[in-house]
Image (tube, coloured by chain):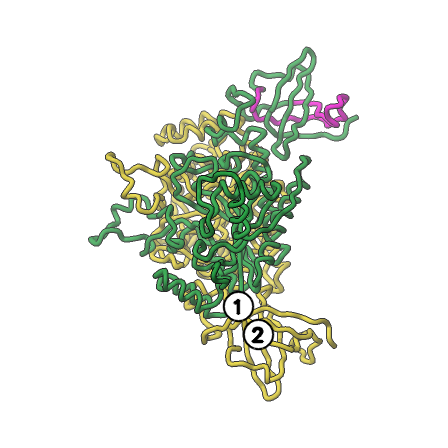
Chain colours: A green, B yellow
């Protein structure tokens, strides 16, 4: 039965010439599903190969086969873009060497569709909750809490622009690529109930591991007028749940839904110390949790997403809110650990009390640098908190992808910046 | 009439103490509109000043005044964040010096809401049209057609990592901040009918003009299986129209709707040469259109958005499709000029014919550098085209804002990278 006339534009995924008929599978990029095309053998052509781009006009009809509901009976086939001979199937590692061609594979075109849907889902989630999306800057003069592994930026050929004193910086001050939009988000949280940012962040980490990229995407949010970690955890959990539900509703694949668990840092240390397992890193109270610890804790709690709260004050950056719970002195910080990936989100309440923040910055010798940050507390500050989620780690977790380089279109890492 | 109990969290926009009653306007960041709060004079407090953050519980009631429908009768007022004395009104130029505080002004909090809505609208438009959103990289080893004014990136403190040969680049090759996602988009357009990117791009332009930023946002799109500039122009116009309609539907303000006009570059040159106006720059066929020309053309055509098509081949980058229309040799490129701003979008069909592209790259000595780009034409290339829209210029145009620095949260330009 003819359903309608159709002009199909797409790429050939298979060519099966038979005696009377030619069978093609053609993919138009809108989904993983290709359309079967049936044509008279006379329409076959030497340029009609795997990967070639075609425009095919014909009739969409009910398919006699059980493998598909419909197929296209072709009247005319035009090869609009030929394709050099190419193998149909390759491993992820092999195709990673060809970033300009890997979106032509099934697995990577799926990834790009999922990444796009996940981006939509994240933005929809925050919009429905009344958050404002803020484009926090990539370039910053903030040296990001003195953290190492910053990229510095100057105009190419800067040597020529030196004055007698040495460098004349383009921005008058040294400029870096952002490692987090948090401080800029806190600025805008001074006028809105909720703000978020979703964009690239950078680390000059000399690592080629499966876990690290020099450029990766972060979702970061700040929420005003909140005083409890529970409020933050609710947003982190809702974001994860609604984004994942959106992805599931767009995919036929079944994905296990998650339960969750909440423990404090102090409970986590007790669990680690009662374990018979030998850890490479220290597990005494005050030590930071390492990947090996995080993986053990996730397993111990039943391989479900795990919130760990209230970390030692001394481990956390200056802006983390003091729990004032001496002698075990903790701060209101929370991490979300997930199976297979480890830390996916990290958040905290921010110290809104001017005197405490001032003292802490002065002790660190940072009170001049962060004068503007102290100002935020002088001009209508509110109790607020926020968190960041690694977008690539989220995708790895949901998709079970082992290497972070396989969930980003153009991976950048040390010694590799292809294209 | 009591409508409901309410807990209001927000920032004080005005304090008017009267004999028996205290009147406040409190803004919660969700819109420009503040809520009037009425309280007994006893609830006044010296910390209750313009800019302070408050939590107020009370009853939402019908207002006796005609100025508002409802008001909040306060039972309790807590100042959760005090605010140092601050003037209520300042010009855009003055507040630009305080990026950490300017979102507390009406005009800039409006801008942030509009920017967020426009971002949503752009993403919704492309999603409805079946485009995939691609996160094209900020870091690139591509020196972007040899264009000047690139930022180069190395780890901070790179000097220490030099080997005997001089620099040891972090990425093994020099890396730059992207000036356009177009080439990366073309890669992904090799597997999808339509792709777009929306993110920051960079120019190391030593300019402090009202028109230039070192970091700004671009919307860029590529469309496969298209052969005509009309197809591209339709998307550019639809994007502009639907984004603006979305903004209008969210704002009470009335904004004039636009008509449009289409002329070729050759017609544009004829218009300029028949004019009695003296231009500073040349107007002979083959010269690029300067801002003064663009402004004249927009005015000449009735101060409406103006598409200019088919520019001289020699003026356009290597990837622009050759119109093969000797002796007046043009390429299939189009710019969208708008009143007040000048060029807002630029687009072209991309040269999909391998032989023509190869010859052109060889003539420019770029065939080795762009081997991967030639590859795209060897592996199922299709006729395609795309365009870029300056997001800040779009906002300037729609809002009538004169200085580009006033439509971005944290402006970066030469000698200025505050925060």
- Residue at which label 2 appears: B78
- Is A159 or B351 nearer to us in this picture? A159
- Residue B408 lies in the magenta stretch: no
Local secondary structure at mark 1:
helix
Q: Are marks 2 and 1 in contact (CB under 8 Å)?
A: no
Residue farthest toward the bottom in the current orientation of the protein:
B19
B358 displayed left or right of A274? left
The quadrant in which the C terminus of chain A is found is top left
Instruction: Say if B50 sits above or below B394 in the image.
Output: below
Total tally of numbered discs in the picture: 2
Q: In the image, what residue occupies the spot 37% across and 64% down?
A: A362
Does residue B115 appear anywhere in the picture? no
Q: Residues within 10 Å of mark 1 (few under 14, many from 20)?
A: some
Task: Give the label on residue B19, or none.
Answer: none
Task: Give the label on residue B106, or none.
Answer: 1
Q: Position of residue A132 (x, y in %)?
A: 56, 57
Q: Which residues are magenta?
A: A49-76
Q: Position of residue B96 (x, y in %)?
A: 42, 64
The quadrant in which the N terminus of chain A is found is top right
A262 displayed left or right of B331? right
Instruction: Say if B75 sits above or below A58 in the image.
Output: below
- Is A296 or A414 nearer to us in this picture? A296
| Chain hosting mark 1 | B
Instruction: Say if B133 sits above or below B419 in the image.
Output: above
Residue farthest toward the left in the current orientation of the protein:
A164
Q: Position of residue A385 (x, y in %)?
A: 53, 59
């Amino acid at each position: 039965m003819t359903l309608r006339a159709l002009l199909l534009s797409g790429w050939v995924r298979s060519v099966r010439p038979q005696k009377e008929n030619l069978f093609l599978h053609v993919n138009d990029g809108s989904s993983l599903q290709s359309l079967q095309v049936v044509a008279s053998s006379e329409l076959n052509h030497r340029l009609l190969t795997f990967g070639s781009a075609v425009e095919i006009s014909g009739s969409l009809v009910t398919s006699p086969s059980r493998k598909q509901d419909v197929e296209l009976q072709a009247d005319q086939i035009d090869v609009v873009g030929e394709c050099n001979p190419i193998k149909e199937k390759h491993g992820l590692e092999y195709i990673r060497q060809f970033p300009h061609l890997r979106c032509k594979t099934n697995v990577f075109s799926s990834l790009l569709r999922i990444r796009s849907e996940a981006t939509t889902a994240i933005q929809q989630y925050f919009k429905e909750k009344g958050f404002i999306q803020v484009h926090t800057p990539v370039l910053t003069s903030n040296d990001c809490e003195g953290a190492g592994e910053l990229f510095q930026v100057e105009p190419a050929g800067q040597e020529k622009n030196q004055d007698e004193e040495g460098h004349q910086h383009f921005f008058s001050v040294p400029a870096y690529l952002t490692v987090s939009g948090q401080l800029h988000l806190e600025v805008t949280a001074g006028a809105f109930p909720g703000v978020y940012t979703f964009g690239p962040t950078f680390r000059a980490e000399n690592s080629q591991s499966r876990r690290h990229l020099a450029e990766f995407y972060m979702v970061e949010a700040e929420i005003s007028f909140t005083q409890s970690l529970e409020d933050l955890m609710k947003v982190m959990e809702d974001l994860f749940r609604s984004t994942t539900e959106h992805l599931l509703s767009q995919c036929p694949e079944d994905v296990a839904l998650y339960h969750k668990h909440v423990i404090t840092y102090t409970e986590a240390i007790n669990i680690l110390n009662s374990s018979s397992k030998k850890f490479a890193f220290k597990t005494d109270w005050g030590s930071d949790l390492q990947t090996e610890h995080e993986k053990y804790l996730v397993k111990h709690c039943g391989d479900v997403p795990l919130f760990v709260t209230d970390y030692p004050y001394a481990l956390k950056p200056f802006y983390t809110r003091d729990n004032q719970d001496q002698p075990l002195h903790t701060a209101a910080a929370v991490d979300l650990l997930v199976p297979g990936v480890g830390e996916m989100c990290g958040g905290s309440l921010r110290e809104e009390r001017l005197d405490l923040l001032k003292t802490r910055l002065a002790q660190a010798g940072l009170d001049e640098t962060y004068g503007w940050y102290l100002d935020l507390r002088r001009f209508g500050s509110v109790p607020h908190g926020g968190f960041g989620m690694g977008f690539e780690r989220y995708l790895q977790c949901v998709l079970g992808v082992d290497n972070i380089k396989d969930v980003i279109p153009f991976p950048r890492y040390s010694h590799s910046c292809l294209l």
